[in-house]
């Protein structure tokens, strides 16, 4: 019976830690509803209400990390100068990555742009804030405590595959997710998850994946005016799609639903795969990825 809960290293199995994390998320839902209901009753701006969900997820992460006898820095949330530098660099790279997809689409006549008559600096800052909260929420869920316990238990490769499936399936109910767009977008989202997973694993920090996630979404939605995973939002520019098939442009789903984005994801994943900015200890760990350790 003991082996069901304790591994050969005399530690609680990683699967139970994951179950605890998920259980705490479920347990915070009544608190989430109570807080948001009361904030809205006080006519709190929705932008302030939006912060409740990531804050509660941070609380769950902090609780699990402390019970695991680690610090937030061990979970990739150090907040040091280097951490903020990686966040900024990731945001810039994510934005450039998006432009590397949008530019070819513009050159082949797949999209044109106009300035939004309602554009203002506040739109850019509000969009940055909103996409930061969204990216933080998704990265804590998909590259945070659960992903890290999966790596410990199953190895990096299998953890990547499982999380890529979760990430892709989590978007199946998004608007405009149908037909060929669903196939391409699901593949692209799975590749994006692998990219973000590599970004965490190569740095042992959530700063770089968080920045990549933020930069891509913010430039795509708030700056360029494309839909982001089927959702539109106020933007600086307005993107007007041409007559190209949606499998090229992504259509109303956003660039992630098109072949240009899928191709770029393959290239970025290959670059991260070859990146050698890892320690010798991590390379040794890579060699044993296929071994099931304390699952």
Image (cartoon, rainbow, N blue to C red):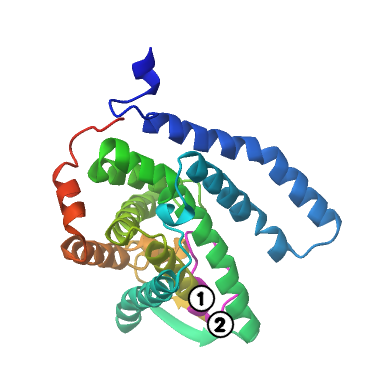
Q: Which residues are magenta?
A: 221-237
- Vertical placement of 145 versus 154: above or below? below
Expressed as whole percent of the image width and height from the top left, the position of residue 132 reads 53, 66
- Of helix, strand and loop, which mostly describes the magenta segment? loop
Identify which residue is drawn at 26% across, 67% down.
264
Expressed as whole percent of the image width and height from the top left, the position of residue 128 reads 55, 73
232 with respect to 37 (left or right): left
Q: Earlier in the sequence, mark 1 or mark 2?
A: 1
- Vertical placement of 130 versus 15: above or below? below
233 falls in the magenta region: yes
SS at circle 1: loop
Asked if the residue at tag 2 contacts the one at tag 1, i.e. Cβ–Cβ closer than 8 Å, the answer is yes
Identify which residue is drawn at 57% across, 77% down.
235
Expressed as whole percent of the image width and height from the top left, the position of residue 79 reads 48, 66
Q: Which residue is mark 1?
A: 225
Q: Label 1 neighbourhood size at 10 Å, few (<14), some (14-19), many (20+)?
A: many
Tag of residue 172 = none
Q: Which residue is mark 2?
A: 236
In the rendered image, the quadrant that contains the C terminus is top left
């Amino acid at each position: 019976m003991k082996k069901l809960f304790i591994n050969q290293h005399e530690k609680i199995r990683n699967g139970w830690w994951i179950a605890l994390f998920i259980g705490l998320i479920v347990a915070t839902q009544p608190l989430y509803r109570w807080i948001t209901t009361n904030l809205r009753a006080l006519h709190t701006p929705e932008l302030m209400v939006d912060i409740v969900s990531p804050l509660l997820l941070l609380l769950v992460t902090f609780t699990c990390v402390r019970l695991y006898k680690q610090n937030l820095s061990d979970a990739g949330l150090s907040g040091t100068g280097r951490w903020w530098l990686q966040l900024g660099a990731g945001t810039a790279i994510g934005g450039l990555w998006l432009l590397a997809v949008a530019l070819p689409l513009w050159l082949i006549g797949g999209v044109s742009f106009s300035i939004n008559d309602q554009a203002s600096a506040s739109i850019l800052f509000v969009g940055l804030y909103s996409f930061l909260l969204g990216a933080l929420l998704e990265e804590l869920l998909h590259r945070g405590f659960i992903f890290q316990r999966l790596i410990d238990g199953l190895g990096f490769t299998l953890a990547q595959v499982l999380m890529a499936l979760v990430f892709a399936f989590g978007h199946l109910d998004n608007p405009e997710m149908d037909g060929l767009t669903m196939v391409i977008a699901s593949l692209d989202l799975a590749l994006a998850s692998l990219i973000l997973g590599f970004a965490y694993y190569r740095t042992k920090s959530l700063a770089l994946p968080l920045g990549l996630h933020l930069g891509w979404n913010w430039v795509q939605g708030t700056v360029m005016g494309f839909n982001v995973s089927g959702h539109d939002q106020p933007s600086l520019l307005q993107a007007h799609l041409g007559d190209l098939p949606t499998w090229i442009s992504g259509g109303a789903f956003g660039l992630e639903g098109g072949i240009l984005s899928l191709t770029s994801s393959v290239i970025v994943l290959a670059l991260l795969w070859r990146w050698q900015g890892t320690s010798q200890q991590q390379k040794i760990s890579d060699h044993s990825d296929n071994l099931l350790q304390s699952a």
